[in-house]
């Protein structure tokens, strides 16, 4: 889980994933959804060096026995993802981790349902990303239609673990950094990536008003999203 963003566009003096949202830090909601799924682990939280103490305090208060490893992130999203994969590498190579789901901690309204969907789809197909139609965004391959359609990708994105790790090792060797996980996988791994239905509620906290919207969405779902 990526928690290395800033808070400049939110107008906060700290990382936005630690801002309060409906009584919990933003990132705690994503950890709650992972815990609700069950059978997902180990969990890795990627943090900025300056946030390590705040991350430890948050995990101590909010995880309720959930085991979460804290890994220091890199200068870019790609580096941070690779650091998380390096931490998991022994378990991946040993076969005890078969699928990796990468989620942005600034998406607190994902709900457990999307985690189940992408992990199950990745096990069947190789990779899965939740997406919504978006006529003015990026084009991606539609595995069902066999053509390019415009989508707006969300997280979590899930992939078979060993090919994902290999893809990031090759990308780092070449100095390549994809805009998201799927870009790196598409370039370096022979995996079929399926687009699964996303959720309009699965918003990313970018601006201050997003916190208000996220709280309304959580309240509308009675704080239990499926």
Image (tube, rainbow, N blue to C red):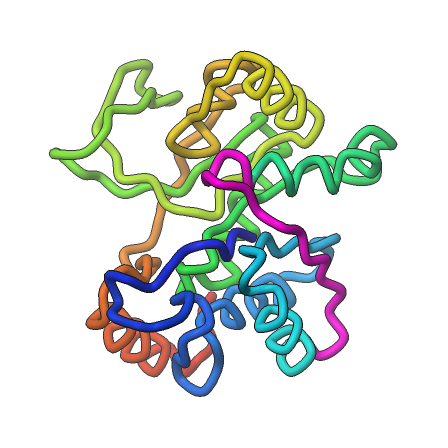
Residue at x 27%, y 60% (from the top left corner)? 206
183 and 156: which is toward the camera: 183
Where's residue 27, x and y in %? 50, 67
147 horizontally vs 195: left or right? left
Q: Is residue 220 above or below residue 109?
A: below
Q: Is residue 220 above or below residue 200?
A: below
Q: Is 79 included in the stretch rendered in magenta?
A: yes
Q: Residue furthest front?
A: 50
64 horizontally vs 145: left or right? right
Where's residue 54, x and y in %? 57, 73
Q: Residue furthest right?
A: 94
Q: Is residue 204 above or below residue 97?
A: below
124 horizontally vs 175: left or right? right
Count of picture labels: 0
Residue at x 62%, y 56% (from the top left corner)? 45
**Residue 148, quarter of picture:** top left
Where's residue 221, x and y in %? 37, 77
Q: Is 69 included in the stretch rendered in magenta?
A: yes
79 and 137: which is toward the camera: 79
Q: Residue furthest bottom?
A: 23
17 and 102: which is toward the camera: 17
**Residue 69, quarter of picture:** bottom right
Residue at x 56%, y 53% (from the top left corner)? 1
Q: Which residues are magenta?
A: 64-80
Q: Is residue 58 above or below residue 198?
A: below
Residue at x 54%, y 55% (from the top left corner)? 48
**Residue 107, quarter of picture:** bottom left
Where's residue 191, x and y in %? 55, 19
């Amino acid at each position: 889980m990526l928690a290395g963003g800033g808070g400049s566009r939110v107008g906060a003096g700290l990382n936005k994933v630690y801002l309060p949202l409906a009584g919990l830090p933003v990132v705690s909601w994503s950890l709650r959804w992972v815990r609700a799924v069950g059978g997902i682990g180990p969990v890795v939280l990627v943090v900025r060096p300056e946030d390590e103490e705040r991350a430890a305090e948050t995990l101590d208060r909010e995880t309720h026995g959930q085991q979460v490893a804290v890994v220091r992130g890199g200068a870019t999203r790609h580096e941070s993802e690779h650091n998380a994969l390096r931490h998991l590498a022994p378990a991946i190579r040993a076969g005890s981790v078969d699928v990796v789901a990468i989620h942005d901690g600034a998406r607190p309204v994902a709900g457990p349902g999307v985690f189940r969907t992408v992990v199950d789809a990745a096990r069947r197909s190789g990779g899965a990303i939740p997406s919504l139609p978006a006529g003015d965004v990026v084009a991606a391959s539609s595995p069902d239609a066999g053509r390019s359609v415009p989508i707006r990708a969300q997280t979590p994105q899930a992939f078979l673990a060993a090919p994902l790790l290999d893809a990031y090792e090759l990308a780092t060797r070449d100095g390549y950094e994809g805009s998201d996980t799927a870009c790196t996988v598409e370039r370096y791994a022979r995996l079929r990536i399926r687009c699964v239905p996303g959720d309009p509620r699965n918003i990313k906290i970018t601006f201050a008003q997003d916190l208000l919207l996220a709280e309304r969405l959580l309240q509308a779902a009675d704080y239990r999203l499926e």
